[in-house]
């Protein structure tokens, strides 16, 4: 077995076993931490498709995270007030059902990613970073100054949304939902990276000219990748909102975009399980260093600096060696 | 909101709600208000130029995207507030802001930034994001979370009456003057001096000027320190209008990034035009849009739609510029 495969198995095993142990030992807070890891990993898995495979440095993925969050917040707030979302031309009511909310979150964030991608992908390099950042700021300031759904204060949802047959208020059951969704996304991500589409996308990252020469439209490849990437991050946003039972404009802030990139980089960019390792490391640091010092982000800063300057493969790259997956 | 009320009055029923003489005076008053807002926009734009000039120079010469530029702005503001509190002299505070930001800039250039010149933009974004975390949290550690205040010197504190009866704070006029002077100095530095020639040569072909015997890494450190000093000066000047606190740099950083992207990355002229465009759009948009919507919406809806749109306006402007000119107004192309 290759070292990276072994490492991936260890990471997923730990993410599954730690909350199971916590469930037996009756430590709900640990389960919540693991749920956060699973959800933030999912956001990172989404970004990794654009960033790792496509080489698209998006400093605006908070847009999709936030759209997912607000999809949940808006639908659930209408359901909890018993006020319809739209009355004419046809009736749309709010809902407290997770699958419906996920579907709405995925579809709206995919649509947003399609439009934003179509506009942003006309630029490249540093201009692409900046235009995605600008779109993120647009959404951030819009939600702050739009009073209908809480404005700057955000929206609270009193009861977690339901999933047929499960009690989502039980931490371990909610964790199970998130873990299954993360596994599905990882599976999809590994299929995508090995598919003809994924190979062409990787090729377009490595040498755009060659890809264009063999007659592949690199713009369309990147647009599809950006859309899939946004959809997965949007789903993560809906779950994150459900975990906290709260959405606020912070989900759209550029720091959120930065943090999602940090998950991917800390773990190892372009590695399938990189976002999972990165998010786990981030949450562990936040939990343990945050307990030691109020200023734990100084250490996070130094760690990130060290990873960027000296350990460019991230956690997985350092532990599993430099080779890139070919299987 | 008095503006949107008067606009409604004059558009809905002209002369119906107020006698004509008073309406005329109201119109004049709103014109004065508009001029004041335009001056505010100019002052804001000039401040943004001080930030953007450094960013765009650093990108143009070294090809580096520096997110920590906002931290240098914060360092300047904190140094000024600390020195002003200790010595009571505003001039000394400004000198301290220049020195502290230039020093911090030189330090991070030598330790971190110079390792990033050959890296991709992703590494640059991340490493400078890490620097933001380090700067912000260490400043919070040293100075605490409460904002500091920097007093405008008494001689500059009052308003002055401009032609046309506009009352405007002297200090803000001074900011405009200082900013214009810095802009002029920068243009002279770049176009007339030996250092300027080297900087322009470095933008075009760094290997060639290294081969001609110019110490390129010293030039880079110098350019970075210069950009840092300008950011620090901007921080100190603005710190006297607003409060000095941790996190003050990031909103300005993002606006400065918008400015250099609109102007075309690497172009100082573009930075000046972009800064004025962003400053005026932001200030006048926030003032005029609610009035505009007030013409056909009810006041509360007009205020909320107007202010929501106004806060997004400069990003819409930027996205629009990039969609039609993907390398900015004065960009050379990638």
Image (tube, rainbow, N blue to C red):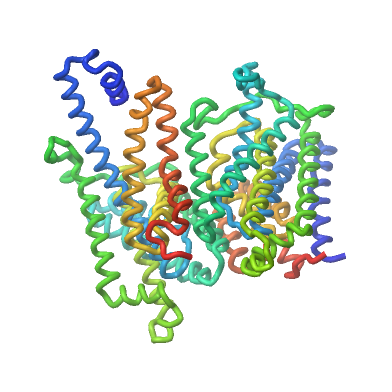
Q: Is residue B142 visible?
A: no
Residue A163 is drawn in which quadrant?
Answer: top right
Q: Is residue B283 above or below residue B52?
A: above
Residue A324 placement: quadrant: bottom right
Toward the front, the furthest residue is: A215
Residue B171 in the figure: left or right of residue B161: right
Q: Nearer the viewer, residue A237 or B128?
A: A237
What's the residue at 60%, 60% (across, down)?
A303
Counting labels gives 0
Q: Residue furthest bottom?
A: B212
Task: Give the percent coordinates (x, y) of residue B117.
Answer: 50, 70
Q: Nearer the viewer, residue B309 or B151?
A: B309
Q: Nearer the viewer, residue A122 or A190?
A: A122
Q: Position of residue B72 (x, y in %)?
A: 40, 57
Image height of B66 relative to A230, above or below: below
**In the image, what residue occupies the spot 16% across and 36% down?**
B166
Which quadrant of the figure contains the N terminus of chain B? top left
In the rendered image, is residue B22 in sight? Answer: yes
Instruction: Give the left or right position of residue B218, taking residue A171 as reference.
Output: left
Residue for point 88% across, 65% down: A1
| Left or right, A156 with reference to B222 | right
Instruction: Farthest residue to the right: give it.
Output: A1
Residue B303 left/right relative to B126: left
A313 vs A158: above or below: below
User: In the rendering, at what x and y percent does residue A281 appear?
Assistant: 69, 53
Q: Position of residue B202 (x, y in %)?
A: 40, 75
Quadrant location of residue A68? top right
């Amino acid at each position: 077995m290759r070292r990276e495969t072994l490492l991936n198995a260890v990471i997923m095993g730990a993410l599954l076993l730690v909350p199971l142990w916590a469930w037996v030992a009756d430590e709900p807070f640990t389960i919540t931490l693991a749920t956060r890891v699973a959800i933030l990993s999912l956001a990172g898995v989404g970004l990794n498709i654009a960033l790792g495979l496509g080489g698209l440095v998006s400093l605006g993925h908070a847009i999709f995270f936030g759209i997912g969050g607000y999809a949940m917040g808006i639908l659930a707030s209408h359901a909890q007030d018993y006020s319809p979302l739209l009355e004419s031309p046809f009736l749309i009511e709010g809902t407290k059902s997770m699958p419906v909310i996920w579907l709405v979150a995925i579809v709206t964030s995919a649509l947003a990613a399609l439009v934003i991608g179509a506009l942003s992908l006309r630029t490249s390099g540093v201009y692409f970073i900046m235009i995605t950042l600008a779109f993120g700021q647009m959404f951030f300031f819009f939600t702050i100054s739009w009073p209908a759904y809480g404005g700057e204060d955000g929206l609270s949802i009193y009861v977690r949304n339901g999933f047929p047959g499960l009690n989502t208020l039980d931490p371990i059951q909610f964790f199970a939902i998130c873990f299954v969704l993360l596994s599905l996304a990882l599976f999809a991500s590994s299929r995508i990276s090995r598919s003809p589409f994924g190979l062409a996308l990787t090729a377009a990252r490595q040498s755009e000219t060659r890809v264009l020469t063999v007659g592949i439209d690199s713009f369309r490849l990147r647009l599809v990748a950006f859309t899939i990437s946004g959809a997965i991050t949007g789903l993560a946003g809906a779950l994150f909102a459900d975990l906290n039972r709260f959405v606020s404009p912070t989900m759209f802030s550029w720091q959120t975009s930065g943090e999602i990139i940090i998950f991917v980089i800390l773990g190892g960019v372009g590695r399938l399980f990189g976002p999972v390792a990165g998010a786990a490391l981030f949450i562990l640091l936040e939990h343990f260093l945050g307990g030691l010092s109020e200023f734990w982000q100084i250490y996070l800063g130094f760690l990130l600096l060290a990873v960027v300057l000296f350990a460019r493969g991230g956690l997985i790259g350092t532990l599993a060696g430099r080779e890139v997956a070919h299987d | 909101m008095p503006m949107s009320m008067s606009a409604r009055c004059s558009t809905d029923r002209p002369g119906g709600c107020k006698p004509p003489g008073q309406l005329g005076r109201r119109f004049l008053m709103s014109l004065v208000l508009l001029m004041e807002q335009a001056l505010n926009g100019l002052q804001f734009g000039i401040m943004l130029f001080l930030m953007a000039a450094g960013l765009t120079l650093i990108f143009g010469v070294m090809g580096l995207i520096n997110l920590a530029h906002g931290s240098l702005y914060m360092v300047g503001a904190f140094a000024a507030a600390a020195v002003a509190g200790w010595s009571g002299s505003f001039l000394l505070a400004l000198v301290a802001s220049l020195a502290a930001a230039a020093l911090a800039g030189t330090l991070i250039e030598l330790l971190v930034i110079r390792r990033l010149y050959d890296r991709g933009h992703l590494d640059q974004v991340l490493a400078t994001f890490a620097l933001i975390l380090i700067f912000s949290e260490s400043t919070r550690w040293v100075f605490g979370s409460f904002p500091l205040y920097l007093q405008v010197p008494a001689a500059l504190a009052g308003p002055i009456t401009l032609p046309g009866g506009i009352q405007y704070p002297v200090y803000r006029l001074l900011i405009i003057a200082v900013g214009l002077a810095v802009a002029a100095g920068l243009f002279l530095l770049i176009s007339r001096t030996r250092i300027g020639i080297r900087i322009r040569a470095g933008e075009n072909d760094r290997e060639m000027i290294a081969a001609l015997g110019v110490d390129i890494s010293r030039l880079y450190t110098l350019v970075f320190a210069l950009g840092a000093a300008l950011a620090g000066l901007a921080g100190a000047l603005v710190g006297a209008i607003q409060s000095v606190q941790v996190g003050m740099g990031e909103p300005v950083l993002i606006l400065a990034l918008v400015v250099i992207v609109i102007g075309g990355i690497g172009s100082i002229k573009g930075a000046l035009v972009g800064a004025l465009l962003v400053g005026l759009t932001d200030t006048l948009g926030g003032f005029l849009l609610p009035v505009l919507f007030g013409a056909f919406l009810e006041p509360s809806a007009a205020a909320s739609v107007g202010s929501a749109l106004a806060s997004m306006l400069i990003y819409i402007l930027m996205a629009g510029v990039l969609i039609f000119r993907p390398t900015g107004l004065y960009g050379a192309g990638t």
